[in-house]
Each structure stands twice: as structure tokens, then as C-alpha cells.
Amino acid sequence: MNSLVYLVLVSAKNSLKELLHKPGKLILYLLLAAIIIGLILLTLFTSEISTERLPLFWLQGIYFAFVVLFLVITIQKGLTSGDVIFDMSDVNLLFVSPVNPRAILLYGIIRLAKVSFWAGFFILFQSSSLSNFGVDFGGLLVLFFLFILSMVVQSILSLVIYSVTNGNPKRKLWVKVITVLVFVPMVAFFAVQFLQTQDPMAALAQTITSPFLCAVPIAGWTAASAIALLGGHYLAGALWLGLLVLGGGVMVAYIMLSKVDYYEDVLVATETAFEKKRAAQEGDVNAASASPAKVRVTKTGVGGFGASALFYKHLRETFRQNRFGFFGIYTLITFVCILAASLFMRGFIDVVVILQVLMWMQIFMIGNGRGLKELYVHYIYLIPESPFKKVLWSNLELVFKTLIESVLFLGIPGIILGGNFLVALASMATYTLFSLLLLGINYLSMRWTGANISQGILLFFYFLAVVLLMLPGLVPALVVGFSVGGVVGTLLALAILSGWELLAALLCFALSKDVLHNCDMPSTKPTGK
């Protein structure tokens, strides 16, 4: 154990030394720390708790759904390769050292806290939204640290699932069945309440406050503990928190007692993550983003001529990766969530609220487009066309996909919510053009910095760049919208915002077109471990 403590201390010391030898990285971290401290001080001295507070149980439902989303991803990881809790340096050096395997496992679990910190980092920026529920900065920290704890427990769960089900299809099927059965009592309770009240909102409220939601492992325990602590019920909060910690402890005990030689179980995920990092550093973005899913080779060949061949190539790759084309798992889950929100919260939200949420999500998803990945391979540089055409055609597939998503995410919900049809159309245009702007920002970052800033810790500065570029259009849109009011004000606001998005996107593309004239192709360089 002493050797592991020494390893942690020396690693921290070496990280500090590395920062001192890299001024750019040091400035980056200092600026990030200053922003975090400034945010904390701003929240402490200027935030005001809303007098018209929303019921706290709605926050429990939102927090529960948020943790469930990560829980589903965790279970999926466990069924494929397990979660990554070690580095290749641990595999090559620590695994072969005369150190107790149980102590090494504990070391890996403790390291998960750092990864979980960055995964839930954005929660610290939700103080204004949480103030509507009467949550102060102390409550914000409670939500943040409980999320970190739940992520650590989920990573342990992923390792246990992989250890139990690896190479056994029947056990994998049982894990899927158990996962579904866990949510059956909660869904059945909601159905009974809905049949009795005929009011979906009342039924949903009863379900959130029922023991059936709290009893859902990890997600229910985390949400119940958070809301109990925020509501001043410290004993209940401690009990639910203790159950979460106990669940993680039981899984750790299972690994330690039943399978001391767990190295092979974690080796697959560790090696996979290492190979993707190395491929990314070498510029092989296709290998870096490779999915374990099987590729369906149904048709071959591409169409088009010149730069347009890139569009047909991306279409072929999309349908090879997924038989349903643009309708992947992300699209399906998002559509189901928006559809449920539209049905259950009709009269409380409108299509513009959904647009705001989608735009926030889009900021973090746009960097995965196929057009941006073309810059990491040589084909796009060899096409004898103008840079503008090549950039346009290489991103047309993503724009087309966004347009289809806008119909599902905004068009259909707009009809269900009973809002103005023109407002729904304007929202679809704003959502689609926003994707163009985000692409332009990514290309501009590659042109002037040689890196895609929508990755790693640079994601924070990417977010700031998006906010700054949106302000010239967002401010007049809000002023006109609130001044005029009503449907006309909303339409004018969306029109102003859409026009600015298009103008800013074209400006970004114009300034970044020379990215295709560079001799050295950009390469993704992951920051941090």
C-alpha cells in the first residue's frame, strides 16, 4: 500500500513539473481555475433564490433521469469491454509488481474520482437553473459530489458486469433482462396512477415521489439522497447515501474475494482506450473513433464527382454503420425523451424551450461530424476543387442529418404542444443553422490553432467561443422578442438569430478555408488521462 501512496504522490508532483515546463498548458489551467473561482464567488455573493420555487421533487426526477442516462451507458460498456480504470503504464508496471492485487484495484477505483470530476464538471455551471428549485451553492456542491460518487460506483458496476458476463451470451442476456425488470415497478406504478387520475403530470409527480423510483439501484439511491439532503432530511439522505456506498462496497468485495486475478477483465478496456489515444495522436482519426459494432457491408461504391463524392461517401458510411441510417441510438433516445416531455408537460413548455435544450446538447455533439474527420486523412486534400466546395460537401451529410432531426425534435413536438406552426418552422431553421455555426467555429479553431477545441479541457474554451459568437445575434433577438411579445415577437427573434447564425457561419468558413492549404494535417492530441 505504501508503494501506491508513493505512486500517487510522485504522479502529482510530476504533473506539476510538467505544467511548469509547458507555459501554455499552465496558463490554460490557471485561467480555468480563475474562472471556476470567479464562478463560485459570483454565485455566493450575487445569486438570489427565486421566491417562486418549483417543487423540489421535480429536480429529483430530472437528476434521476440524468444519472439513468449514464447508467445505461455504463451497463452497455460492461457488456462489451468494461470500463477503463487503469492506464497502460499500470498494466506494464503496476500489474507485474509485487503489490497486492486488491490494493491495486482500490488504487484504480480512487483514480476514477478524477475522471468523474470532469464528467460532472458542467453541473457547477447550473446555479441559475437550480435557484428556481431553491437550491443554493451548497446544494449545488451536494449534487456535484453525489454525481461523482455515483459515477465511481457505476464504473465498478461496469467491471463486475464484464467480469461476470465475458464470453457468456446467456449471462449477457440476463443482465439486459434484469436491467429492464428494475424499472418495471416504477413504470407499472405510473400506469396505475395515470389510469386513476387521467392526469399525466399528477401521475408523473406521484411516481417521482414514490419508493419505486428511489428503489432503482444507483440512480434512484443517488437522486433520493440528493433531494433528501437538499430538503433538510439528513437522516434519510444519509441512509440513501449509505446504500449507494454499500452497493459499491459489495461489488468491490465481490471482485476482491471471488476473482483476485481480475487483470484480464480490465486489460481489454485499457488496451482499447490506449490504442485509440495513440491512433488519435498519430492523426488516424478513423481508428481513434472506431466502434466495436459490426459494419454491415450491403452496397459498395460512391457517387458524385469531385468534392461531391465526399457527401456520397459519408452517406455510405452512415448506412453501413447503422441500417436505419441517420436514426441512430442518440436520435432515438432524444426523440423519445422529447416526445414524452411534449405529452406530459403540454401547457408548461413550448417548442422554443425544447430548442434551447437541443442547442445546448448540440454544442457538445457537433465535433463528431464526419466532415471534420476528413481533415485528418489525406483524401480531401487531393481533390482538385476549391476549399469552399470541399468544406461544403464534406459537411452536407451532417447538415442533412440535422435537418431531419429538427423535424423529429421540433416539428412533431411542435404539433403535439399545439403551438404556432411558423414558430416550429423557425425553430427548425435556427437549430439547423446553429449546426453550421458550430462547424464554422471548429474549422476556424483548426485553421488558427491546429487543433479541434471541442475536445478535452479545451471544450470549456470552445463553449466560451460559441457564447461570444452568438451574443451579437442573441442580444438583439431577445430585445426584439421581449419588446414585441407574442407569436410575432418569437418569430422575429428566431429570424434574427437564424440570420446571424448563417452570417457568422459563413464568416467562420471564409476565415478558415485555408485550413485545406496546410501541408501538415491536424492531429487530435488528447489532453489529460
Image (spheres, grey):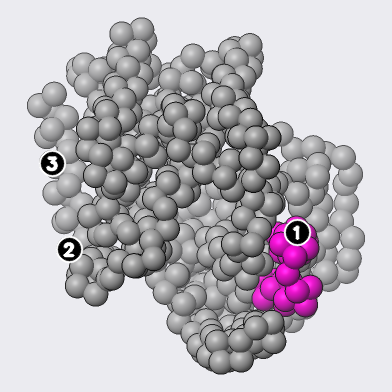
Q: Locate residue 456 relative to residue 72 in the image: left or right.
A: left
Residue 55 x %, y %: 42, 53
Q: Which residues are magenta?
A: 404-432
Q: Is 413 included in the stretch rendered in magenta?
A: yes
Residue at position x 25%, y 59% in the image: 137
Q: Marks 3 and 2, how far apart in space?
A: 17 Å
Q: Nearer the viewer, residue 147 or 64?
A: 64
Question: Circle 2 sits on which residue?
Answer: 20
Question: Circle 3 sits on which residue?
Answer: 9
Residue at position x 39%, y 65% in the image: 52
Q: Is 103 included in the stretch rendered in magenta?
A: no
Residue at position x 49%, y 85% in the image: 471
CB of mark 3 within 8 Å of CB of mark 2? no
Query: Dividing the picture into quarters, in which one does residue 510 lie?
Result: bottom right
Front tag of 2 and 1: 1
Mark 1 burial class by Cα count in 10 Å: few <14, some 14-19, many 20+: some
| Residue 236 sits above or below residue 163 on the image | below
Which residue type does callout 2 highlight? Answer: Leu
Q: Locate residue 32 relative to residue 468 in the image: left or right.
A: left
Front tag of 1 and 3: 1
Q: Earlier in the sequence, mark 2 or mark 1?
A: 2
Question: Circle 1 sits on which residue?
Answer: 416
Q: How many marks?
A: 3
Mark 2 burial class by Cα count in 10 Å: few <14, some 14-19, many 20+: few
Q: Nearer the viewer, residue 518 or 51?
A: 51
Mark 3 burial class by Cα count in 10 Å: few <14, some 14-19, many 20+: few
Which residue type does callout 1 highlight? Answer: Ile
